[in-house]
Amino acid sequence: MARLLELPAQDLDQHIEEEVEKNPALEAEDLDDPTADGLQVELPGRMLTAAKTPTAAEENENSDWNAQDGYREPKVALEESEDFYGPFNFRTTQSLYESLIEQLAPFELQDWEREVVEFIIYNLTPAGLLSVPLEKLARQYAYQVGREVPLSEWERLLGQVVHKLEPPGVGARNLLEAFRLQIEALDPQEEPLKPLLHKLVTEHGEALEKGQWERIKRRMALDEATWKALIRRLAALDPRPGLSADEAVAPAISPDFILHFREDGAFQVEVVYYRPRRLRIRRQYLELLEKLARQREPELRETYEEIKKRVEAAKQFMEHLQQRERTLRLTVEEIVRQQKAFFLNGCDEKYLRPMILEDVANAVGLDISTVSRVAHSKYIQTPCGIYPLKFFFSEGVRAADGGEVANKAVWRHIRELIEGEDPENPYSDEALVKLLQERGIEIRRRTVAKYRHQLGIPTAAERRQRYKLR
């Protein structure tokens, strides 16, 4: 069950497919009707394993609509709007980004390591290159996720993970690095020029960038035939390695949830399924199981137990899918409820409230680990755009009224103040502390400096100098 909670919507499709292939008692039928529910689970009403009869409360829980709330979705089956399958949903080809994410499984990364690696991958250009400096990526990550990761860890994960993915050269920060990564991936037995190629791009990179061919040739002291072969092989390297693996070339993030708001402030959360289907236990297995149970022949006992085992596994899997959706919906609805002011004010970060995993877990009666799994690697499409669920979690800073202000809200205040400052006389960190205090935010100078750095904003002296150089 824990694994199901962690799976994003698109990975869930693959997991269901694998389960169907593994268990012949489980049957999946694709639904061609675009108005069909995203995932229909048909649990048999009569089984030898004594299927539980739902209570009256559970019957109401699974009914299509709650008359009192008026604007709530079904708990298991979802009514999809006409534009449910938007441009970010169905993909007929696999993009570079999807290919790279799929290759991460063998690395056995910790959760935070995988988050950083995925953040790098989704910031690659369509050509597979990393054009954003790691320092800036680290600051952006800290801003979005609310947690800092040392730059040394970004360097390590880029080199030990991203640069080891296929096709060779992805994640390179410049052309020479792209060439070097491709050369290092060559088999020396199949490519005898590998040592010379590596020397060319590592020891003569500056001259190579300037096109000083004759100078390089003299310094490498190569005969004409070897030189021409080396240049031909260099020309065969791909300056845009990502395009060879990317048929779709679109780094679209596919949401796991869709948030709708009505004019009166009521909201609705959709749990997304990208492949509408109906899951059920094969009728032939249920009939055979019942027949064997009636016969009670000793020589068929082993067959009966095997079929019963498969049927029970199929039933349990479908029950877990139902439980997954109820848990996802319960958790995300609470996240939206606690951050409702953010959405109702045009997604202005100043309206974010402090919220940690424990806050949501206590509100919905779940373990903190369960809430963490729900928020892991999942995104929600809102009227303001797509956000990672972890964006809405942040620590608090003390406010003048005794309450707390989310650190992301403080970041927004700092950006707003600096954007409106006099460029010839920019605010120092001490001045920002006083201005924030006037807005009811109690904060120390070193915390302001830390947040400013996370936002990628230079010091007051550097901002003044940059303005003078314009």
Image: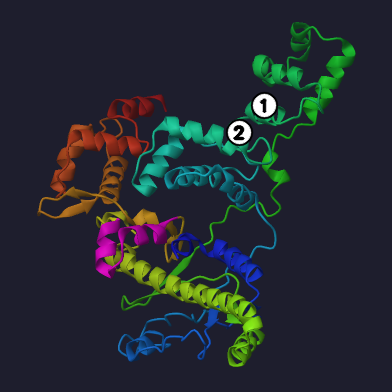
Identified at 62% across, 83% down, the residue is 298
**Residue neighbourhood size for the residue with mark 2, other residues' Cα within 10 Å, grouped as few (<14), some (14–19), many (≥20):** many
Q: Is residue 401 above or below residue 226?
A: below
Which one is in front, 460 or 129? 129
> In what quadrant of the picture does the C terminus appear?
top left
The location of residue 404, given as percent across then percent down, is 17, 53
Q: Secondary structure at mark 1?
A: helix
Q: Do the numbered discs 2 and 1 sit on residues whose CB atoms are within 8 Å?
A: yes
Identified at 55% across, 33% down, the residue is 160
Q: Amino acid at mark 1?
A: Arg
In the image, farthest residue toward the left: 401
What residue is shown with label 1?
180
Q: Describe residue 287's horizontal placement relative to residue 119 as left or right.
A: right
Which one is in front, 104 or 449? 104
Q: Amino acid at mark 2?
A: Ala
- In magenta segment, residue 429: no
Examine the image and state in which quarter residue 375 appears: bottom left
Q: Describe residue 172's horizontal placement relative to residue 322 as left or right.
A: right
What residue is shown with label 2?
172
Camera sees residue 437: yes
Which one is in front, 43 or 193? 43
| Segment tinted magenta in the rendering | 357-376
